[in-house]
Amino acid sequence: EAGVAQSPRYKIIEKRQSVAFWCNPISGHATLYWYQQILGQGPKLLIQFQNNGVVDDSQLPKDRFSAERLKGVDSTLKIQPAKLEDSAVYLCASGQGLTQPQHFGDGTRLSIL
Amino acid sequence: AQSVAQPEDQVNVAEGNPLTVKCTYSVSGNPYLFWYVQYPNRGLQFLLKYITGDNLVKGSYGFEAEFNKSQTSFHLKKPSALVSDSALYFCAVRPSTDKLIFGTGTRLQVFP
């Protein structure tokens, strides 16, 4: 089966600019996750979708981050405006239930200048 | 607060020797437990999980993990390490109705 696809792989922007990341999950996976992984740390959940509805966005900085999954398939995560502390790898994952593993894409490495 | 601890930032082992990467957790109830591996510039890859049943679970690439409920631990093991096992390993815990909580990761370095 095809894995989780993410693009772009790398992005460099200046602070206060905006950026968007795209994710296409594994076919049939109802649950989609966006994580932020800062260098030297484990992934931190930003937002979880179940189909096209938000299940958990408690750790999403909503003043600057937004995400959508309009048709219950692919998803976009946006940052506007970006801050220096947003430099991280943004990982997308998909899954099928609490007891099943999450499958991760290779991530987007974001550098803020 | 619920948390996952990986007490060693790095584990060094010689090729052919057994390896252990430690994980302990503090969550309520009976959580689901996972191990993932991350190679440079890649996403996390699933290795194995414990949901219920036998305390020793076997996973991909010859890895296994032992669940110990009394010690709230889920240590990752492999009888004979390979240089290609060198990577970053993450323990993750999911309380039964909550999100996945990751440890900070342990870098495994296997020397030839």
Image (spheres, coloured by chain):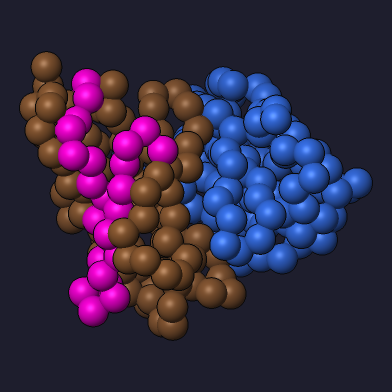
Chain colours: A blue, B brown
Residue farthest along the top direction in this orientation: B112
Which residue is rendered at x = 70% and y = 49% of the image? A32
Which residue is rendered at x = 50% and y = 33% of the image? B43
Left or right: A48 with respect to B47?
right
Which residue is rendered at x = 57% and y = 62% of the image? A99
Q: Quadrant of residue A27?
A: top right
Left or right: A1 with respect to A82?
right
Q: Quadrant of the N terminus of chain A?
A: top right
Depth check, front residue: B75 or A64 = B75
Left or right: A16 with respect to B63?
right
Depth check, front residue: B98 or A100 = A100
Q: Which stretch is magenta?
A: B60-83
**Image location of residue A70, percent across then percent down:** 88, 48
Does B26 lie within the magenta span? no
**Image location of residue B9, percent across then percent down:** 19, 44
Which residue is rendered at x = 25% and y = 56% of the image? B75
